[in-house]
Structures are given as C-alpha cells and as structure tokens.
Amino acid sequence: MSDLNSGLSPDSLAQIDREVAKYPAEQKRSAVMSALRIAQVEKGWLSADTIKLVADYLGIAPMAAHEVATFYNMYDRSPVGKYKLTVCTNLPCALSGGAEAGEYLQKKLGIHYNETTADGKFTLKEGECMGACGYAPVLLVNNHTMCNHMTPDAIDRKLAEFN
Amino acid sequence: MLEIEIDGTKLTVPNGTTVIEAARSIGTHIPHFCYHKKLSIAANCRMCLVQVEKAPKPLPACATPVNDGMKVFTHSDMAVKAQQGVMEFLLINHPLDCPICDQGGECQLQDLAVGYGGSNSRYEEEKRVVPNKDLGPLISTDMTRCIHCTRCVRFTEEVAGMQEIGMAGRGEHSEIMSFIGMTVDSEISGNVIDLCPVGALTSKPFRYTARTWELSRRKSVSPHDGLGANLIVQVKSDRVMRVLPLENEAINECWIADRDRFAYEALNSEQRLTKPMLKQGGQWIETDWQSALEYVGNGLKSISREYGAESIAVVGTPHSTLEELFLLNKLSSALGAGAASFAGRYADARLTKAQQGATWLGLAIGDVAQSKAVVVVGSTIRKEQPLLAQRLRQAVKRGLNLSIINPMDDELFTKLSGKLIVRPDQMVEAVAAVVKAAAEHKQQTVPAEVADVVVSDDARSIAKQLVAAAASEGGRATVLLGNLAAHNPRAAEIAALANQLAAVTGATLGWMSEAANTVGAQVLGMEAGNALVKPRKAVLLFNTEVEFDSHDAQVALATVKQAEMVVAFSAFKHAGVEYADVLLPITPFSETAGSFVNMEGKLQTFNGVVKPLGDSRPGWKVLRVLGNLLGLEGFDFDNAEAVRKAALPQGEVGIAAKLNNAVNGVVVTLQPAGAGLVRLGEVPIYQGDALVRRAPSLQKTRDAAAPMVSLSAATAKQASVAAGDKVQVKQGDAQAQFTVAIDAGLAEGVVRLPVAHPKTVMLGAMFAPIQLTRA
C-alpha cells in the first residue's frame, strides 16, 4: 500500500471533476459521496489519508468527508478481500433466512463478520437493507452484484463461481 | 406579524419566528438540548416536542415556524407524554455517573431529568460505551455521556468556520469525534464546553478541581485583546477556578476566545511574584514594601539629580487597567520624564506625532458586521481578534464582501472577496494601490503621492467593492487596521493612506486595538511607542517584559541591561531577574478593581474577584505610595474609583471626545520592495501578554507550537532549503536555528518567524531584514 499517501490518479480526478460539475460551484461538497466511491475504487479502500485527499480536493473539512465515509457501509475503511460479500441482516431478510445465510457463510469461510479469509479472497460484511426484501435473503458481491434467495445451496453455487 | 397562542397566552411575533423563540419571548420555557439561538436548527434531540392544535402528533418547537392563529400547548398531556418519552430514550444510554461528572450541578440533562425523567429506568440491558477522544489540551471528553445533540459539530462548522468535530458512524454506533489524529485547534474551541448540554465535553484544565455549587460567580472583563469580552470568573477559597463568558450581545455575544477562558491558569501559577525583591550584590533577597519602595524612590531621585529626569524611561503595556496607567503616566510626568510609553511594539514615531486622538474601531463592534464591505489591513485577524473574526465570518454568510491586504494569506475559514498579499515592507504600496484604484473608479484626482503605484486587478476589485458598499442604500464600508499595520515600521504611512482610502470610498476607518486598554492608554495621553530604543539610566517597567513586548527585543534588552536601575512592577517572576534591580509584586486584573476601554471606546469597570496573592498589591496602590514617597503632588486616592474619576473627569463622554483616527502631516513616500529577505514577525496568539504566556494549557495548543521559519516554496528554493531542513537565521549580531516550513501564503522574500517567543527573543526587529543560511 505504498501509494496511500500519493494523490489520486488523473483518471480518478477526472471522474470526480465530472461529479463536481453536476452541482453549483459553491456546492462542491455535494459530490462527496461520488468522490469517495471513486477514490475507493482506485485505492481498494478508504484510509484516513484517502478520505483527507478527497476532502481537500473538494475543499471541505476532513471530518465532513469522514462522517459520510463512516455513515454508509458500502465504504470500506479497512482493506477487503477480492470478493466482499455483504449479507443483509435487516429485519425482513433476517426473518427470511438472512441470519442463517450469514451463519452458513461464516462457517463455510471460517471467518466472522468484518473479517477476511487468510488467502485474502473473501471478506464478510453485514449489510443494511438493499431494497429487495421480496427476494430475501439477499447478498451483495463487491457492492455491485446482487444475489437473491441465498439459501445454503445457492451460497455453495455462488462460491463455486469464484473458484 | 403572526398571532399565536401559547398555553392560552396570546401574542404576536414576526414572520419566521419558531415556536421555541415565541415561547421564550413570553417566558415560557420549553425543554431542549440541541437548540441554541446562535446555531442552526438540527431538531435531533426531540426534547422540545409540544402539542400544536390540529397537528396529529407532537411537533419539535425549535423547528416549527409559527403559523397565523397557531395554538400551542407546552404542558398538555400529549406534550408532556412526548417529552417524558424522549427523556426516557435519552437516559437509556446515559451513564448514571453524575457524582463524578464535572457537569453535575450545571447539567441540562440532569436538570431536565428531574422535571421529565422517571424515578427509575425500565431499561435493564447493557448500556453503550463510547471510547473517549483526544481533542487537545483544552477539552476533556467523556463520550459515553454524549446525547448526540451536535451542538459542538455545528459550532465548529458555523461559528469557528471549520468543522473540526463531526458525528461519525450511524445509529447506535454514531460517535462525536475529531478527524483521525487531529485535535480541535480553533482559537475559540472552548465554547463547545459551554455548549455541551451534558458532561461529554468539559474543561480539561478545570477537570475535577471543584464542583459548580462551591464556586462564587463574579463579573470581570478580559484583559487580553481589544474587544473586552465580558467574563464570569468563578472563585473558590480565594482562588480563580474557572472563567466563563458573561453574555453581552454588543461585545462578545455568548462566546469568549480560548485565551479569555484558559489564561486564568496563570493567576495561580508558581511563577507569581508574591514578595518585593531587591538585588543586592548580585543576589535576590525578599524584602518588605517599605524598603523596596524607598530604594526605588532614592534611586529615582539620585538618577534624576545626576543625569536629568529625561534619563528615566517609564514603560507600560496596554494590558494594564486605566487606573494603573493613569498613575503611571502621572508619575512619569511628575518625575519630569514626560509621558509614559505603553505600546512597545509600535515602531513608527511619526504615527504618534501625526495622530489626532485615540485610535479606535471607528464604530460599534456590532456595526462592523453590518458593513457590506470590509477590508482588513495587516492583521492575523483570527489570532489577534478571535471573536471579531467570528463576527465577520457570520457577516460574510449574510453577504459581506471581506477582503484582506496582508503580508500573509492565512486560512480565515471564510470566503474572501479579494486579497493583496505582499511583503511586510510593501504594505504601504499595497494600500496605495487601492487608494489609486478607488480614486480612478470614482473619477477623482489621484492623490499625487500614490500616482506612480501599479494597480493590480485585485486592488481594483477591492476598491470597487468598498465604493459600491458605501454608496449602497443604508450600506456601510469599513477599513480595519490590525496589529501588523500598527507594528509596521511605516505604520504612519499605512494609517495616512487608510484614511485617504476611507475618504475616497466613503468607508469608515477603524483600528482593531491590540490590547484590552489600548484605547484607554491613548485617552490618558500616554505615548505609543518604545521608550527603550535609546539608552536610559533608570527604567520603570510596569507589567512589561521587554523581551516580549518590544518591536526589537535586541535593542530593548540592551537598553535595560545598560541602565543603572531597572524596576520591574510585575505579577510574575520573569526574565527581569537578569536585568532588574527591584521586583515589585503587583496584582493581575483578577485581584484589583479597575477598568479597560475597549476598541469601540466603551469603558468597562470591574472589581477584584479574589484577594491579592501574598504581599502583592494592586498596581494603582503601589504607584500611589511611590508617588507619595517621592513627595509628588496629587497621589492621594482612597480607592480605584477615585483614581478613575481623576483619570476621566467626564467619564465616557471624555473618552468619546478623544476618539479620532485621523492623522496629519504624514509624508507618504512609495518605495520599491527591498532586495533581500525580510522578516514577518507577528506576535503569536498565546504570547501576547504576561498571562497567556504562563497558562500551561494554552501553551500546549498547536497555536503555541515552537516557532518555525516559514517560507514560500519559491523563497525556499532560492535559499536551497526544503521543509524540515534546519536553517541558521541571523538578524544583526544574533543568530538562532529553526526548522523550515513551507507556507504557500507568503510573498517571495518573506521569512515568517514570530517574535515575542522565548525561542526568538535574541533576534531583532519584527519586520526587518533577515539572513538565512542552511545549517
């Protein structure tokens, strides 16, 4: 992680600029969520240094960016594995097998929530409602791919895809 | 206007009033935690829920604007039930540690729990525990007690200007904290202690030293900056334990700066001088007042006889009371030594001669923020005048155009409409450029002395803003001069041009006084400037530490070292032990009656809040006895009030008559920038006066960090140094080593290195040439 202190890549900055341009000039802070997402994609996770880089770039207090980065659980504030599996444990999912899905994954991967497997392949996270309660239990892979009806069998099939 | 009925009482309120404000105006108290009149509305504590007719559920009074004909019930069953419910939730996670909590006895949660809380809790599960945070040397944290009202967050963002505190996480995991690894460094940070409605943020220096009900509360006035913030000094067993703001909307609102709040630590310091001391045969011995004063009296008489009275220098500081300075000045003239001098960091003798009266703010403090354009000339305004800077920051949000003409571009945490950043020796030329631009803009004849100056676009836009603001209906434009202008070796020329600028644009000119009694000292006819620039036989130093309170510490120290007799009237044992012959213990502001005249010319009187420590005595009493002992006329006063009457026979009217910012007969000669490096030596915020220098907690803040040599990147490159390098700095014959820092806000050729610091006292003048070599 030697590039932690170095700035964001020109590509990332260009992406952030595009987000900033969506808001009035004096409202640059409105782009903080997108900017943090772009920074996370580049760096893999959001260190305090990265958060400060984003804050400085937008001209806001580091704490203002830190508030956002800690509020939303799709931002990772520690390094994650190649596949980040986020299990929804909010009430509808939890009642429809979400809790079991989480336990099954913990047993299968040999890690607890918020841990990464020794080979650096999987990180397990608890997630907030993903707006798909009808398809419970749901699971999110790397913040982007939603998987429905994650019974133990479905989980096995999914994990097999990653091998 | 809207009609509203609160608990059966009918009243009319202006549009936009909230229910909580309407209720307050008729004395109805609605319980609340997150609401604060000076902060934005958050409505997140929910404590102020009230019943509103036709609303299906209780509404938060702080966030509900009054509608015409609204009927509000603050004590109905629905309201009380809602308030009790909120209180029960707030107490679920709040620890029951009131007996060991510093807030106990002055805690809003404790008070409201008595009114709205149950006698026991239904909650039996585990309470949440939150780790404490390091917010720096001034604020102590017990974060488990936090109820997430976010007043501290809103204060840092809205009032202090930089959101140093925030709420991280969410839901049950949310925590108030500063950014990772950062402390809260604002110069007005202590106010979050007052704002915190519970014991989550408390005063670190005060921690566990007293309970609030043991303290008596006494009014006083801050002796530091020229604002004259009103204070409540809290006292236990004749010892000052804590200082809080006394609300005065016209001066300090409900805030005080950190130096007003924490400098009290010096009052109880080990370094306090408690006995008169004489140096005999190179040894300091304690003595009694009689012998000490006789020694001083005899010494003054014999020196006056032998070398003439003009060989005596009487030097004070504007941090002393009006009564002390009056008698000091009287003593000086009665001795034949002329007026006493009081502002040792002033270096331009032409300014004193040219001034037509006592320089002041030019308008009321509250009116500054009503201006539509303000230009600050030569001021580290956040550090020099923390609360005035805060007022300007609020005004900028309401549309004020704030510009600066400064030798540095420090972060002011506000939007600037224009800035001219120049070398300290080019301040005159920078103001001249704006004068010329303003004259051109108004199509007036450009004054001959500024005709040759080059006008930049920035200067033109600053001039335009001033002209437009002054010409707008009911508008006002203000030009404010700060310490860096007053201490500049060409201060008279800056003042003359600032007067011209005000005249051309129609702006008001004001000086932001350096210290609590700068205006008072001038009203008394004391001489602004340093009497120690030429050799003297006898020197009386009143509340003055020459190495910190002089424009050129080298010269001043040389003067006192060669003097035959140096008498130091001081509340502290200071470096004077090396050069003084007599140390006379006078009391600080907390142990004497007195008064200060603040920058708007307001006379503020206070009484001593505790007894003088040891054998120390109020300065005015010491001077009275000394005057009598010397057989001088007119030194018989029974009390401080009698001294004040003699000093100001007409009271405030007499002050107002002397306030005048005009200067006469100053010849402005534009000069090119110097070729070499020039020093920018400002006085650090916690080195300004004898008290702050000895307040341990303030000395641990980042603002009190060891001085560094700051350079712009270009200057550093020319000198072949980089950030972190050690450099040898030379002024005159003196040298010292410092570490380099890069400061992008400096003009080329500027070496920023503060004065008035123990690590820099051996060096020379504030804005003089300086040499720099890599160590």
Image (tube, coloured by chain):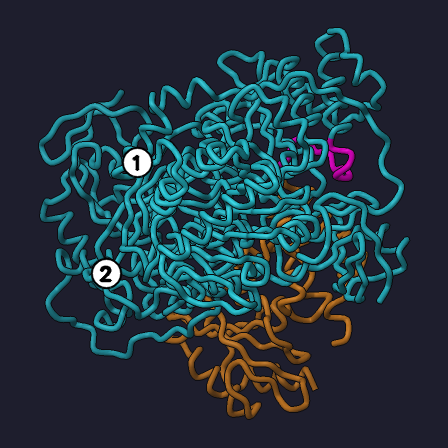
Chain colours: A orange, B cyan
Magenta stretch holds residue A12: no
Q: Earlier in the sequence, mark 2 or mark 1?
A: 2
Q: Secondary structure at mark 1?
A: loop
- Give above or below for B133 relative to A114: above
- Give above or below for B566 relative to B68: below
Q: Which residue is mark 2?
A: B212
Which amino acid, by three-letter code, is at mark 1? Asp
Using residue B389 as the reference point, say whether residue B442 is left or right of it: right
Task: Give the CA distance from mark 2 to mark 1.
Answer: 41 Å
Q: Which label was assigned to residue B636? A: 1
- Give above or below for B665 relative to B98: above
Instruction: Classify residue B703 by image quadrant.
Output: bottom right
- Give above or below for B253 relative to A34: above
Q: Residue furthest top?
A: B444
Q: Residue drawn 31% across and 55% down? A: B612
Mark 2 surroundings: few (<14), some (14-19) or many (≥20) residues within 10 A: some
Q: Residue drawn 72% across and 31% down? A: B490
Magenta stretch holds residue B421: yes
Using the image, name the chain to which the residue with label 2 belongs.
B
Q: Residue drawn 55% across and 40% down? A: B305
Who is closer to the viewer here, A130 or B753? B753
Using the image, name the chain to which the residue with label 1 belongs.
B
Who is closer to the viewer here, B56 or B420? B420
Measured as percent of width and height from the top left, residue B155 is found at: 44, 49
The residue segment tinted magenta is: B415-427
Same chain for mark 2 and mark 1? The answer is yes
Which amino acid, by three-letter code, is at mark 2? Thr
Who is closer to the viewer here, B507 or B728? B728
